[in-house]
Amino acid sequence: MLGLGTCTLCPFNLFADVIYLKSGRKIVAEILREDSKQIFISRGGGEVAIPRTIVDRIERSPVASAEPGEERGNPGTERQRDLPLPPPPGEEPSASGSLVIRDDAIDRVLLQRLDEEVSRDPSTGNLHRLAQGYQEAAIFLTRQGNPEGALDLYRHALRLAPNDLALTLAMAYLLVKQTYYGEAISLLLPLEDKHQKTPGIPLLLGSAYYATEDLNRAVAEWNKSLALQEDPRLREAVAKAEKEQDLAGSYLEQRSEHFLLRYEGREAEGLVRDFLNTLELAFRDLSLDLDYIPHETIVVLLYPDQSFRDITRSASWVGALNDGKIRIPVSGLNSMTPELARVLKHELTHSFVRQITVGRCPTWFNEGLAQLEEGATTTGLGTQLARAFVNDRLPTFATLEGSFMGLPDDQVALGYAKSLAALEYLRDTYGMGAIRRLLKLLPASSSLDSLLQDELRLSYSAFEQEVANYIVKRYGS
């Protein structure tokens, strides 16, 4: 029987340090490690180095107390579940200052001037300045929560400077983050022979191939990258992909308009058709409900139970998992059931949320929305939930921003229940429009706390109290 305890691994910056630069700017991020010359921070599932020479001071998160090299809670575990990527493009301006960012906005007149200079004189210097300006502008838009606008800038710049490697890698990085895997592959493949010593090219190609379930090419590209530069996280990804390769040889596949489904055994073909039909119906519903249409094929993998545990290394209570691919154990199933249909819609919701928020959704919001979309309600456990709120026996929303896998077993069910209660409160108080708006604003927000304050005029603590009041009023204490 397929369990209903599902899990999506979706990191959020719970352990944020603040780095103040001498320029007056600040960077909010988790410091991963540091040495005498550089500070390494977490960005986009990878790490980026900041020279100490441009740093004024650092304010540490009060929970950032781990020893050097030690994992700091769930966010470290979460990163291991993302696609391996090179460090993101540099987010700070050069020593001479920003080329096109003025008063916290893009100077479009300066961008136009860079275009005209290259059109008039495509010299190395003009091409370099154009690439620098457009990369600054694209990074700015990405940080503002407009990655699609950033990609448009990259595409325009590469038409004028098609041989700029840094610009191409920056665009490929964002394409993979935005799940435009096919476009990333088309962009990177012509570079491989010309830039054989650049590890980021096969690394990004491997991640794009892995996301589209082309495991042989993924492993081959990742091994090329490892031959150029050692990366323990990438080596772990290769080991996982090789396990999946071993299984894939015996698997069959079917496709529909939006899905690639892989499964074991021809006897499951009738169930597979039901799977695809159910997934397509859920896709249609979610597209309307969340006002979003994912642009890449979604991979769904059906496993025998033990294979599911071996590949995902998930806790025993996890009945399905979405780490960019939907993974479901199906031993003993021979027909589509209402319970299984709910699980599929739940996991598909995570795929939508992952793309809408660029992976920056707190787990409680993600899990609460997935339960809401699958049709779950707090009705059956309302009295128990109200009593838990009154007696302060529930984990805080701040705690639930990270993976539920880190919760004690007796807190997991309460974590899911509180997450559902929060999304019911948002829907019933502000409407689905507010939920859609919060999702779309998450990529550009420094924290959910600030987003709730800006959009709903609620601090995190006030939001906790409002959700508690909502549940107690509905179900009593």
Image (cartoon, rainbow, N blue to C red):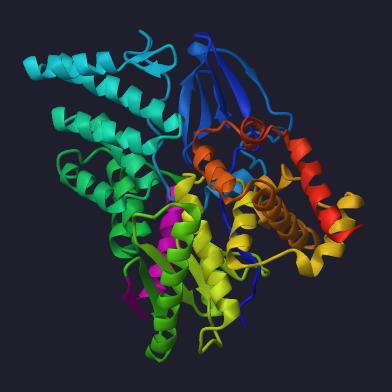
Q: Magenta includes 373? A: no
Q: Is residue 214 left or right of residue 304?
A: left
Residue drawn at x 42%, y 48% is 84
Residue 42 in view in this figure:
yes
Instruction: Residue at 61% x, 71% y: name it.
Output: 319
Residue 253 is one of the magenta-drawn residues: yes
**Which of these two is toward me, 252 or 242?**
252
Residue 172 pos. (x, y %): 30, 41
Q: Residue at x 69, y 36 (%)?
A: 66
Where does the N terminus fall, quadrant-wise? bottom right
Closest to the observer, 455 or 313: 455
Q: Is residue 308 left or right of residue 91?
A: right
Instruction: Residue 14: name its quadrant.
Output: top right
346 relative to 41, above or below: below
Above or below, 346 relative to 165: below
Image location (x, y in percent) of residue 165? 22, 32
**Dividing the image into 4 quarters, which one contains the C terminus?**
bottom right
Report the span colored magenta.
233-256
The answer to whether residue 345 is left or right of residue 377 is left
In the depicted view, which residue is nearer to us: 78 or 225?
Answer: 78
Q: Residue shown at 33%/72% (left/top)?
A: 256
Place of residue 365 in the rendered image (x, y in percent of width and height, measured from the top left): 63, 50
Estimate the x, y position of residue 397 in percent, counting from the top left: 73, 45
Main secondary structure of the magenta stretch = helix
